[in-house]
């Protein structure tokens, strides 16, 4: 599912440089990427999702060389094949829960919003326990409910790859477990690949593979 | 709110605005129905009977003449009620005699454009009245009541001028009937000329015969035909009081009149008393209002006959 | 398109106060100059409508503006008087129909307009009740005057003295109200209409008094000589014209010399109008003829010049408001950076996101334009009526 070769990425602002000589993640695998803050975990996710472009090297995601696409193509690829979950949930406060879940379909011509999609959204919300809150504004939900709504948004397009950046970082233990359960259920159920960045060592044991980012790739900052 | 509902709400809003704009921009026009006036006779109101007669002779079928003064009332002193004045206001043409006739006209509101002063063409030939009431008050100081003799129609030439004024007024309002008005006016003028000739002959025969006039209503007749006459203030239906008889006798002493001309037949005892004084009575009807019998010309012809009946007696009297 | 409009709508609705303020600002900056233009145009039209409807006005030489204001709007002092003979002059010219006016006296604060019956047809005035005056001493009230004085047909009103010290001039005449006009939303609504001759009676140029030949009037008689009776100032004059005493009312002197303040000349056609105006151009001509429309236009030109400055000021404010609105939008974009980044991250296309932000602007602008348009339409529809009521009050 994910293949990275000779990746180098240098931040514009700072002197930090990310180097990933090689990384392979198989389809359907669940991988936890751990490491201290600032070691480049989020940057890795951005490069895999095609949000950022490497200085050199290749990133192949789901068989597509994402690093070789232009911006519109990367966006289209991302919205169709990659589901993203953020630590801060990143829900739009002025939209209802349902509208947030359906957001990818409204902001990309690559996806077509039709009644079946709405039905899927309602079903998803019901499965994660927020089916009765679809009409509320996201700001009216609890932390756990918000993250579950964000997870629904990530899953609505039935992506082959799920990238979650600290999905449980702002949740209490009960909700942490719930959200992870949802992510794993979907990954196992659909055969999707799950790549999760986390520095929460309590949750890593559930993953197929754990990548210690600092140990493997180091922060080869040019000093 | 679902996106479908939002979309529909926007569409409805545009529709409402659109219809509202249409409604606002519609203009209500004034629907003014046009009426064909030509087929409707002219509504003509007059202030005395001679004008009624002239108007009917000249206007014929093209006019509808109204003269609301009750019979038996002198129209010169008649005062119509406001409702009758309102009827005058609705007329197409209002014929006035002029010469301060019908003083009610000066106290009424009549549409200026519809008024026709039939004596306007001979205004400078009007005969001022004697007898004034002078008083002093108000901002203008001393002033007096003056007026004019108003029985202008008794002079057939002036009557003809009044008739011409009527014809002109009708023609101004109904120019399409000018030919009819002109022809009918010509017929009336012919009759008035014949009347004038007869009266002139009768007057000529009188020469300077002194005449008494029961009331000062014959000024124009007297002036035009050069009659020698003096006016009194006697009413045909009121017996003169003794002082009046005395004044008459004194007058007769220096003014030996043998004929008195009355507006209407005098009381039999008045006529008898006059006869004893050597004065015969004759009736010259001023014809201000509708008579019991006869129209204007018939009455004027009767007046001429009365005047003619005076002449032979005057010639035998003057010859003796 | 529908999706971006929907998302734009949700955003605007959520921030409804900000949206309302923006829409209101846009509405105002569009409506103010446009609406003001419409309103000023309507005001000018209302003010000049009456002047437009009055082809020619004849009066004594002097201030044309005073003549127009007194004759059309019954405002200003009574102008220099003219003789009634002028009416015959115009009538006999064969070029126009004259309608005399004598606006000098008042009944409380309501002007008494002495005129003839033609005035009502000329001004297209209809009667709500009663009828036009028929005889001396009757009057017709405008709708608002009748309402304010609480009188109707059958009641009476009294003319007011010209001044407190007016002891020997005009005296209060009680007039009988015989008609009330329908509202016309002009100065006519506040006027008392009487026959010209009735106003001459108020001035003292006509009067009614005791019959001097009657015994009751002996104390008022100075001397009797034959048919001539000379009365003194003790003669009792009537201050109300009734059916019993109307026959005693009379005028003194030549009516042609009696005063009027102006006369409308309604020309038969354009050529007649030109010819009639030409007759009043003589150097020694004591009267003047004016076109009220020209006089009012000159007056309004001055007022309307101010409008240009006001509109210019409004446009400057509008520019500033638009700049502020743009700044608000740019600032809100900055505040929404995270939201926009989220949409980018989850794969939102550039065009969709741009279109979404643009839609928000378009919806606000469009709403402002539509509201401003609606307000302008309402102004156009109801402005005239509001102005008439305001001007009349």
Image (cartoon, grey):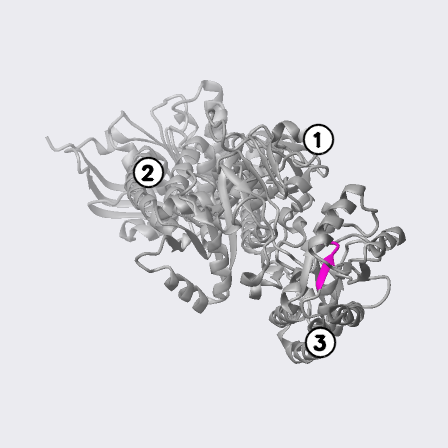
Q: Is residue B276 above or below residue C172?
A: below
Residue B211 part of the magenta-drawn span: yes
Q: Which residues are magenta?
A: B210-215
Residue found at the far right of this picture: B268
Between C202 and C352, the one lying in front of the other is C202
Across and down, in percent, residue C41 comes to: 41, 49
Q: At 47% from the left edge and 59% from the top edge, which residue is drawn?
A: C89
Q: Can I make out residue C301 in this image?
A: yes
Left/right of residue B293 with respect to residue C249 in the rendered view? right
Parent chain of label 1: C
Across and down, in percent, residue B17 comes to: 54, 49
Tell me the CA gap for discs 2 and 3: 107 Å
Which label number is shown at residue B201? 3
Between B298 and A85, the one lying in front of the other is B298
- The nearer-to-camera label among 2 and 3 is 3
Between A88 and C240, the one lying in front of the other is C240
Q: Kindly state the secondary structure of the residue where label 3 is placed.
A: helix
Residue beneath disc 2: C325
Q: Earlier in the sequence, mark 1 or mark 2?
A: 1
- The nearer-to-camera label among 1 and 2 is 1
Residue found at the far left of this picture: A223
Parent chain of label 2: C
Across and down, in percent, residue C230 comes to: 58, 36
Q: At 72% from the left edge and 74% from the top edge, which residue is drawn?
A: B205
The reply to whether dot 1 and dot 3 touch (C-beta < 8 Å) is no
Across and down, in percent, residue B169 comes to: 62, 68
Tell me the CA gap for discs 1 and 2: 93 Å
């Amino acid at each position: 599912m994910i293949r990275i070769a000779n990746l180098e990425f240098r931040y514009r602002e700072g002197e930090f440089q990310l180097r990933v000589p090689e990384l392979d993640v198989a389809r359907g695998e669940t991988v936890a990427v751990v490491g201290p803050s600032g070691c480049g975990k989020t940057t890795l996710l951005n490069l895999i999702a095609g949000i950022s472009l490497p200085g050199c090297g290749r990133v192949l995601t789901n068989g597509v060389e994402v690093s070789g696409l232009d911006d519109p193509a990367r966006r289209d690829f991302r919205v169709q094949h990659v589901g993203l979950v953020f630590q801060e949930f990143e829900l739009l406060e002025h939209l209802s829960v349902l509208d947030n879940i359906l957001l990818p379909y409204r902001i990309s011509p690559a996806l077509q919003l039709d009644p079946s999609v709405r039905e899927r959204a309602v079903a998803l919300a019901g499965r994660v326990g927020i089916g009765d809150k679809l009409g509320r504004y996201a700001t009216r939900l609890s932390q756990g409910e918000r993250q579950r709504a964000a997870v629904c948004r990530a899953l609505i397009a039935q992506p082959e790859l799920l990238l979650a950046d600290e999905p449980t970082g702002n949740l209490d233990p009960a909700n942490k477990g719930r959200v992870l359960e949802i992510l794993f259920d979907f990954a196992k159920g659909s055969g999707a690949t799950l790549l999760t960045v986390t520095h929460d060592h309590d949750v890593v044991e559930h993953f197929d593979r754990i990548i210690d980012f600092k140990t493997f790739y180091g922060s080869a900052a040019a000093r | 709110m679902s996106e479908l509902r939002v979309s529909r709400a926007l569409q409805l809003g545009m529709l409402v605005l659109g219809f509202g704009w249409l409604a606002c921009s519609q203009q209500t026009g004034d629907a003014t129905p046009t009426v064909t006036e030509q087929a409707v006779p002219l509504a003509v109101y007059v202030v005395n009977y001679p004008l009624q007669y002239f108007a009917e002779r000249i206007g014929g079928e093209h006019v509808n003449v109204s003269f609301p003064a009750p019979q038996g009332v002198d129209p010169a002193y008649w005062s119509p009620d406001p409702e009758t004045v309102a009827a005058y206001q609705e007329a197409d043409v209002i014929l006035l005699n002029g010469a301060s006739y019908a003083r009610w006209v000066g106290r009424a509101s009549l549409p200026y454009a519809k008024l026709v002063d039939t004596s306007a063409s001979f205004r400078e030939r009007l005969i001022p009245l004697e007898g004034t009431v002078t008083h002093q008050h108000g901002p203008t100081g001393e002033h007096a009541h003056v007026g004019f003799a108003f029985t202008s129609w008794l002079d057939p030439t002036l009557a003809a001028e009044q008739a011409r004024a009527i014809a002109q007024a009708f023609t101004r309002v109904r120019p399409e009937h000018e030919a009819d008005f002109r022809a009918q006016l010509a017929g009336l003028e012919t009759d008035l000329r014949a009347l004038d000739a007869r009266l002139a002959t009768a007057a000529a025969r009188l020469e300077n015969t002194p005449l008494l006039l029961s009331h000062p209503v014959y000024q124009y007749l007297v002036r035009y035909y050069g009659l020698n006459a003096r006016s009194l203030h006697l009413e045909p239906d009121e017996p003169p009081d003794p002082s009046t008889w005395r004044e008459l006798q004194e007058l007769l002493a220096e003014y030996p009149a043998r004929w008195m001309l009355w507006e209407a037949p005098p009381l039999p005892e008045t006529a008898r008393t006059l006869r004893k004084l050597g004065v015969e009575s004759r009736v010259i009807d001023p014809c201000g209002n509708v008579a019991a019998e006869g129209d204007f010309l018939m009455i004027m012809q009767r007046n001429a006959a009365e005047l003619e009946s005076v002449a032979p007696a005057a010639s035998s009297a003057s010859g003796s | 398109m529908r999706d971006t409009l929907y998302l734009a709508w949700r955003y605007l609705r959520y921030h409804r106060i900000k949206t309302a303020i923006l829409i209101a600002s846009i509405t105002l900056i569009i409506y103010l100059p446009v609406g003001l233009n419409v309103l000023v145009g309507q005001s000018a039209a209302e003010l000049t409508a009456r002047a437009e409807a009055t082809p020619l006005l004849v009066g004594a030489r002097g201030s044309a503006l005073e003549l127009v204001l007194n004759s059309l709007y019954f405002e200003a002092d009574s102008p220099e008087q003219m003789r009634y003979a002028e009416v015959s002059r115009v009538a006999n010219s064969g070029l126009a129909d004259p309608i005399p006016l004598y606006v000098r006296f008042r009944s409380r604060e309501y002007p008494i307009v002495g005129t003839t019956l033609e005035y009502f047809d000329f001004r297209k005035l209809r009667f709500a009740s009663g009828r036009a005056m028929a005889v001396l001493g009757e009057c017709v009230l405008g709708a608002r005057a009748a309402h304010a004085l609480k009188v109707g047909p059958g009641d009476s009103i009294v003319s007011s003295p010209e001044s407190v010290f007016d002891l020997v001039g005009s005296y209060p005449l009680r007039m009988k109200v015989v008609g009330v006009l329908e509202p016309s939303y002009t100065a006519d609504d506040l006027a008392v209409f009487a026959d010209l001759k009735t106003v001459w009676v108020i001035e003292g140029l006509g009067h009614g008094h005791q019959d001097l030949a009657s015994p009751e009037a002996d104390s008022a008689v100075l001397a009797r000589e034959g048919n001539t009776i000379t009365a003194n100032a003790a003669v009792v004059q009537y201050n109300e014209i009734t059916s019993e005493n109307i026959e005693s009312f009379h005028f003194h002197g030549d009516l042609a010399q009696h005063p009027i303040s102006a006369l409308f000349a309604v020309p038969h056609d354009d050529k007649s109008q030109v010819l009639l105006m030409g007759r009043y151009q003589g150097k020694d001509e004591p009267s003047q003829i004016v076109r009220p429309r020209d006089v009012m236009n000159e007056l309004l030109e001055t007022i309307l010049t101010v409008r240009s400055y006001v509109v210019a000021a409004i446009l400057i404010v509008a520019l500033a408001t638009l700049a502020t609105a743009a700044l608000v939008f740019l600032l809100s974009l900055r505040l929404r950076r995270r939201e926009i980044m989220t949409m980018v991250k989850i794969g939102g296309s550039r065009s969709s996101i741009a279109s979404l932000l643009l839609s928000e602007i378009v919806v606000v602008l469009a709403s402002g334009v539509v509201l401003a348009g609606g307000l302008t339409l309402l102004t156009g529809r109801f402005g005239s009526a509001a102005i008439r009521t305001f001007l009349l009050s």
